[in-house]
Amino acid sequence: MKSIKVGLLGIGTVGSGTFNVLKRNQEEIARRAGRAIEITLVADLDTARATELTRGEVKVVNDANLVVNDPDIDIVIELIGGYGIAKDLVLKAIANGKHVVTANKALIATHGNEIFKAAQEKGVMVAFEAAVAGGIPIIKALREGLTANRIQWIAGIINGTTNFILSEMRDKGLDFDVVLKEAQRLGYAEADPTFDIEGIDAAHKLTIMASIAFGIPVQFERAHVEGITRLQASDITYAEQLGYRIKLLGMTRQTAAGIELRVHPTLIPTARLIANVEGAMNAVMVRGDAVGETLYYGKGAGSEPTASAVIADLVDITRLATAEPGHRVPYLAFQPNAMADTPVLPIGEVTTSYYLRMRVADKPGVLADVTRILADSSISIDAMLQKEPGQGEQQTDIIMLTHQTQEKNIEAAIASIEALATVVGQVTKIRLEELN
């Protein structure tokens, strides 16, 4: 049977991993796919480097348009990244009747609806397993393995850079800025780490998972996103003393009022497996009404782990290339004409528990004032930690964990607490999820 011809756009870290794994395991992959899959054309601006990485075994060009317009190419792998040229090339490949595999989470999270519509009209497939959690097959699990379930919530540690930083802060008691520099030195963080440390990368991935889980269009612009830049080492220490660990968590949940879609630092009980995911590893926890809680763990980035997901998509497309479009697995798990318009909740309407840390004057009556304000907002206290002031100090920290309440209630209470003459500066607020 004629082999599947693949064109590769970009041969950086993931592209070179894809080329090498596909070459190394070509016999095994062909046995699974039913026919050979081979990369025959590579586009990269650095043609000399691309020729070296492919060992001169394939044709290399410096114009990606030559790949998407080549009539002999069946599948285009987009590994350029970003929103601009990558989007144009993907849409051009689709218009030319080519299937597309991409690891570009930003592209799918922001322009997925347009891309899927174009692909549906043309009868081609767009696969993006590698866009979320690297080598962990979470897209396939959500879209196919858990298809019998009504998904209730997803919680994910889906950015390795921030998880490495938080692990180091906890282990060494260092502040964020110090650990970030070390992460950059070791290559875990980019020179410009904004997308990672501000939670944007995680929000792109969460947006995609939420759409598959709940059958809604991709809506990255409605996600609530907070990073880890304001976290203090003291908060990580206090959380540990209360039986919790702080992780940058992507959380999406379906409620009666709508869908929560949020990324932010979160306290998680240390007893939960996901709280013990350390270093640059990723993990995604999914709760379905039939299966209960499931956990998916592994490397969320890297050359060959991500290549594993890219090649899995190539195999899926190869198997289904001759199937009628209506018989293929839908891009977002639900049939395109059955997508829901369930609203994404603004953060003020989200209900969860909270960690509060406040610096207060060491005077009688301070705690009574704070608890009165919380009670007036119908917020009850679950646990509390009050530090003894150091010798000669006139101030101390009070740490509280609340029971569940709406975000707008906690914000109103914090404003009143900060207005107290005995409270110094701002109250630190971190959301808390029990995940049970």
Image (cartoon, rainbow, N blue to C red):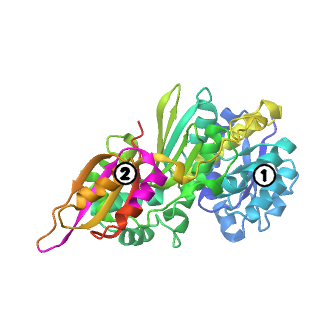
- Tell me the tag on residue 114: 1
The reply to whether residue 24 is in sight is no
Instruction: Look at mark 2 in the image and give the residue it sits on.
Output: 376
Q: Amino acid at mark 1?
A: Glu
Q: Is residue 54 left or right of residue 424?
A: right
How far, Cα to Cα, is label 1 from label 2? 47 Å
Q: Are marks 1 and 2 in contact (CB under 8 Å)?
A: no
Q: Residue 397 or 253: which is nearer the viewer?
A: 397
From the viewer's perspective, is the residue at label 1 or at label 2 nearer? 2
Q: Indicate whether 175 appears above or below 433.
A: below
Q: Residue 338 or 102: which is nearer the viewer?
A: 338
Magenta segment: does it hold 321? no
Q: Position of residue 153 (x, y in %)?
A: 52, 39
Magenta stretch in the rendered image: 392-414
Q: Indicate whether 21 appears above or below 328.
A: below
Element at label 1: helix
Q: Amino acid at mark 2?
A: Asp
Magenta segment: does it hold 400? yes
Question: Looking at the rendering, which quadrant does residue 423 occupy?
Answer: bottom left
Quadrant in the picture for the N terminus: top right
Question: Looking at the rendering, which quadrant does residue 369 occupy?
Answer: bottom left
Measuring 74% from the left and 57% from the top, which residue is drawn there?
Answer: 58
Mark 1 / mark 2, whichever is N-terminal: 1
